[in-house]
Image (tube, rainbow, N blue to C red):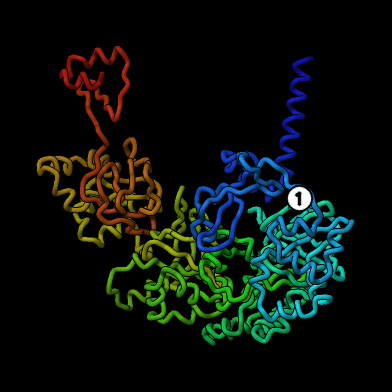
């Protein structure tokens, strides 16, 4: 019973701990990490990371602590009192809690002396010294200094109205700690109840109207102060209103209306819109732009690619983060110093134009998703430039630029020999790199047949770590365009040309092998449906055998057939399917060990001199030597063959002892 009570208490304790941990906000988690990093300097000391050359400081999370970088820039560590604490002369750390005073006096202590000064000039002092429970998002001294002169002049020239209204917009008529500032929440301000918009991000950054909270939870007798890094203004319009009224976004406005997205951008939500300016649209080739603008599906995909599902203020980004768009793919949103970046490029001209339902960042380059591109445009923007040029030179542009549902197999540049020139044979081959339907690599299966524009059928082979169409294996993620898909493959396709026997007969290197197959009575086998993989010894491989051994082998059809069948397996294995330790079961014998080293396939340590000669009933790999079982030792009297390691019974061991040399005996033991 006592044991059961102990287990019950332990379970309750663990549940309580888990609940506390799960309930902790991202900001509190980062603050706790900063406390841990600073505790060696005394109680209530927090480690802060400051970006070198700036005044920007951050509580540190684990990743930033070890990388010592924020927005790609190096940081220096400083140790400061955690929020709500102060130093005492002669004492280590920050042992004393800050004395509670009213909000007006707290502003001076918290580093918002300029806000304190303007509060007095706007005759707000009496209100924030008096009774109540307020939250003041107080701009820091640096925030006021960064305000454009014309805006600051307009405020201070009419302190009783404009300045007072601006300060009231920074206030909420209730106490809100950092724990109350939930992501996506909004609270009515003390200026005409216009909402202030809160976002609390997973990295611990908290913003109000996209202004970052740089000092939080400065408690006062009549409320709480959070110091923010900019002066915020009232938000009254939705994001579509920005697009509808800004002449720099005229082309975007037309596109949004044509795509039917107006209502969405006027609805409730928390969108992030990367708004391309007129200049961004003008950079796109007119033919491509007109095609997209005239295609509602492509246009909607293009615009949705510029809209994130969640609201991301610029200050929330401290490193590159993949974020999902309404189009379904992701954008890499990051930062480089003070610049916000998209997919690694600093193309954002204007940040944090806040609306009631999201935020707009102006960009000077149009982002075109794959789903809005033709096959030719997909290929031109990828690492298959040689193949792209050849497709065009072969007269296939109309297929790749049109609305046919197709899939192209685009070999990467390394697959082509230098100085490749267009020939009739190459044109025919390239036509067989275009499949007659739009496919996804995820839908392909072993043995599937795919018809090409050239009229032949290609087979699909699925291996543990590769997916191949004939000899060409897919080496990159699909690129899915408006009408077609591009598979980037590692090799130029070699379509099957006849049976295995036809392939061997057509190549002079295999004349001795062809004769051996005929002598061994295996011709019919090599013409059957299969499928087979044949490791075909070249004439040089046969010539390397001692002449007497070769003659003896050729005079014994049964033994010859056994040797040849050890070079054959009843499955298709192209070179792209060979891993570090691949095994095949030959038609006769124990096993074949394959591996890949320096782009060369080895079978039982014999290198393949040319791989992937495709046949309708299998594949041929040319080898420069006769393949033998690995490390075979014959025990003469018994016929036992020992491969890497051989276990024998005591009786058998005694029988063969006398026939083995002492050196061999030691090896067996």
Q: In the figure, is residue 90 to the left or right of 116?
A: left
Residue 548 sits in quarter: top left
Quarter of the image that includes the C terminus: top left
Instruction: Please provide percent x and percent y for residue 172.
Output: 83, 61
Quarter of the image that includes the N terminus: top right
Q: Is residue 629 above or below residue 190?
A: above
Q: Looking at the image, which is closer to me, 120 or 517?
A: 120
Residue 300 sits in quarter: bottom right
- Residue located at (57% from left, 43% from top): 37
Q: Looking at the image, which is closer to me, 90 or 258?
A: 90
- Number of numbered discs: 1
Instruction: Please provide percent x and percent y for residue 587.
Output: 34, 41
- Residue located at (37% from left, 40% from top): 585
- Residue located at (55% from left, 86% from top): 282
Kindly give the residue lying farthest to the right in the view shown: 131
Q: Looking at the image, which is closer to me, 107 or 386?
A: 107
For mark 1, give the secondary structure: helix
- Residue located at (49% from left, 73% from top): 378
User: Circle 1 sits on which residue?
Assistant: 179
Q: Looking at the image, which is closer to me, 262 or 616?
A: 262
Q: In the figure, is residue 412 to the left or right of 57?
A: left
Instruction: Please provide percent x and percent y for residue 196.
Output: 78, 65
Let me know if residue 326 appears in the view.
Answer: no
Kindly give the residue lying farthest to the front in the view shown: 89
Instruction: Please provide percent x and percent y for residue 236.
Output: 80, 74
Q: In the figure, is residue 629 to the left or right of 551?
A: right
Let me know if residue 663 appears in the view.
Answer: yes
Q: In the figure, is residue 135 to the left or right of 299?
A: right
Neighbor class of circle 1 (other Cα within 10 Å; few <14, some 14-19, many 20+) is some
């Amino acid at each position: 019973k006592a044991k059961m009570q102990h287990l019950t208490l332990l379970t309750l304790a663990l549940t309580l701990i888990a609940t506390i941990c799960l309930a902790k906000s991202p900001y509190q988690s980062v603050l706790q990490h900063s406390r841990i990093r600073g505790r060696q300097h005394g109680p209530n000391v927090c480690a802060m990371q400051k970006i070198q050359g700036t005044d920007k400081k951050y509580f540190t999370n684990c990743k930033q602590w070890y990388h010592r970088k924020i927005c790609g820039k190096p940081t220096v560590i400083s140790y400061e009192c955690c929020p709500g604490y102060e130093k005492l002369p002669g004492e280590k750390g920050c042992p004393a809690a800050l004395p509670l005073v009213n909000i007006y006096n707290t502003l001076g202590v918290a580093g918002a002396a300029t806000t304190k000064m303007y509060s007095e000039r706007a005759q707000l002092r009496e209100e924030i010294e008096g009774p109540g429970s307020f939250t003041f998002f107080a701009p820091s001294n640096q925030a006021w200094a960064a305000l454009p002169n014309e805006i600051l002049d307009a405020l201070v020239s009419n302190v009783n109205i404009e300045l007072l209204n601006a300060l009231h917009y920074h206030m909420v008529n209730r106490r809100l700690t950092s724990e109350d500032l939930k992501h996506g929440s909004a609270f009515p301000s003390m200026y005409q109840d216009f909402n202030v918009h809160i976002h609390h991000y997973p990295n611990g950054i908290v913003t109000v109207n996209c202004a970052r909270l740089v000092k939080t939870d400065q408690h006062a007798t009549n409320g709480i102060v959070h110091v923010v890094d900019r002066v915020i203004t009232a938000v009254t319009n939705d994001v579509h209103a920005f697009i509808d009224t800004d002449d720099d976004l005229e082309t975007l406005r037309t596109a949004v209306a044509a795509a039917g997205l107006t209502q969405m951008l006027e609805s409730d939500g928390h969108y992030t819109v990367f708004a391309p300016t007129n200049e961004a649209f003008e950079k796109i080739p007119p033919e491509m732009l007109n095609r997209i603008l005239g295609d509602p599906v492509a246009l909607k995909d293009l615009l949705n690619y510029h809209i994130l599902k969640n609201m991301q203020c610029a200050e929330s980004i401290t490193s590159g983060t993949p974020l999902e768009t309404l189009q379904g793919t992701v954008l890499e949103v990051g930062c480089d110093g003070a610049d916000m970046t998209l997919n690694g490029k600093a193309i954002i001209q204007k940040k944090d134009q806040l609306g009631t339902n999201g935020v707009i960042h102006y960009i000077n380059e149009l982002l075109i998703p794959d789903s809005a591109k033709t096959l030719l445009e997909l290929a031109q923007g990828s690492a298959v430039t040689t193949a792209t040029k050849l497709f065009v030179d072969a007269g296939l542009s109309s297929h790749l630029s049109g609305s046919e549902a197709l899939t192209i197999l685009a070999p990467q540049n390394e697959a082509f020999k230098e100085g490749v020139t267009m020939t009739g044979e190459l044109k025919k081959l390239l036509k067989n790199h275009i499949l007659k339907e739009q496919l996804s690599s995820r839908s392909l299966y072993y043995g599937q047949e795919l018809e090409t524009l050239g009229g032949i059928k290609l087979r699909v082979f699925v291996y543990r770590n590769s997916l191949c169409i004939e000899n060409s294996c897919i080496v990159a993620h699909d690129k899915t365009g408006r009408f077609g898909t591009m598979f980037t493959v590692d090799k130029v396709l070699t379509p099957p040309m006849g049976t295995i026997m036809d392939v061997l007969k057509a190549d002079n290197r295999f004349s001795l092998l062809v004769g051996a197959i005929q002598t061994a009575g295996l011709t019919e086998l090599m013409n059957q449906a299969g499928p087979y993989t044949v490791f075909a010894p070249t004439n040089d491989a046969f010539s390397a055998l001692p002449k007497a051994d070769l003659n003896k082998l050729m005079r014994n059809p049964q033994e010859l057939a056994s040797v040849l069948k050890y070079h054959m397996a009843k499955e298709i294995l192209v070179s792209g399917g060979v891993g570090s330790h691949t095994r095949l079961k030959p038609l006769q014998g124990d096993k074949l060990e394959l591996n890949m080293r320096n782009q060369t396939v080895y079978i039982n340590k014999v290198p393949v001199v040319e791989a992937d000669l495709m046949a309708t009933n299998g594949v041929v790999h040319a080898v420069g030597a006769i393949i033998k079982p690995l490390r075979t030792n014959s025990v003469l009297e018994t016929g036992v063959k020992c491969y890497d390691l051989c276990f024998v019974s005591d009786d058998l061991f005694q029988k063969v002892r006398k026939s083995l040399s002492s050196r061999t005996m030691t090896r067996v033991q």
